[in-house]
Amino acid sequence: MAPHRVSIEVRWGDMDALGHVNNARFFTYDEDVRLGFFNQLMAEDARFWKDYGLILAHIGCDFVAQVRAPATLDVAYGIARIGSKSFETRAFMYDQGVLAARTKAIVVWYDYVAQATLAIPDGVRQQLSTYLLPEQPESD
C-alpha cells in the first residue's frame, strides 16, 4: 500500500540563525505526522491514548537538504518493520519534490496503566501492515 501522506507548512519561526529550518524542527514534524497518523488509525478505539497506546523509544534523522521558509513539506510516512511489541516508522520529507530529511523511529505499544510494554494487538498489527513500506536501502 502507499504510505500515509500529509503536508506540513514550514513557519518562519522554524528557521534558525542560518536561515534554514532548524534541525530539531524535523523531529517535531515527525511527531506531528506520527500522532496524526495514529489518531486517525485508532479513531474508533476510545481506550487508545488513555489505557494503552504508543511511546517513542528512539528517533533519528538524516538531514539531506536545507529547507527555507516559505515552504510546504510533503511527507510520506509508513511502517518499515513490525515486531512483537514495537515497530519502526519512516518519514520522508520533501521540499518541492527534493528529499530534505528522513526520520526513522522505534515506537513501542504500551500499557499506560500498568506502565509496561504490550504485545501489539492483532487488529493493530493488521492495520499497520497496510502501511508497510518497501525495503529502503540504508544510506551512507
Image: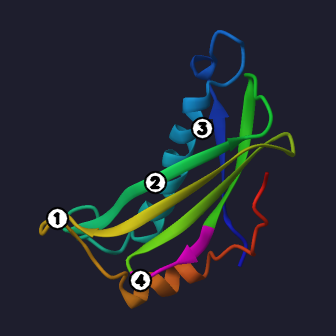
Give the label on residue 25, or none.
none
Q: Which residue lies most toward the bottom here?
A: 122
Q: Of the residues under marks 2 and 1, which one precedes in the sequence? A: 2
CA–CA distance in space, label 2 to label 3: 14 Å
Range covered by the magenta-colored residues: 79-84
Secondary structure predominantly adopted by residues drawn in magenta? strand
- Secondary-structure class at tag 1: loop
- Secondary-structure class at tag 4: loop
Q: Quadrant of residue 51?
A: bottom left
Q: Name the residue that disc number 1 marks.
A: 115
Viewer-proximal residue among 126 and 63:
63
What residue sits 69% from the left and 44% below the top?
62
Q: Name the residue that disc number 2 marks.
A: 58
Q: Of the residues under marks 1 and 3, which one precedes in the sequence? A: 3
Residues tagged 4 and 3 counted as in contact (Cβ below 8 A)? no
Q: Which residue lies most toward the left here?
A: 114
How far across and how far down the image is residue 36, in percent?
A: 48, 55
What residue sits 71% from the left and 12% below the top?
18
What residue sits 28% from the left and 77% below the top?
118
Left or right: where 72 falls relative to 127: right
CA–CA distance in space, label 1 to label 3: 28 Å
Q: Could you classify mark 4 by the number of other residues whose Cα lies within 10 Å: few (under 14), some (14-19), or many (20 or more)?
A: few
Q: Of the residues under marks 4 and 1, which one precedes in the sequence? A: 4
Viewer-proximal residue among 121 and 85:
85
Q: Name the residue that disc number 3 marks.
A: 26
Left or right: where 12 falls relative to 28: right
How far across and how far down the image is residue 70, in percent?
A: 74, 23
- Secondary-structure class at tag 2: strand
CA–CA distance in space, label 4 to label 1: 17 Å
How far across and how far down the image is residue 140, in percent?
A: 79, 51
Q: Quadrant of residue 49?
A: bottom left
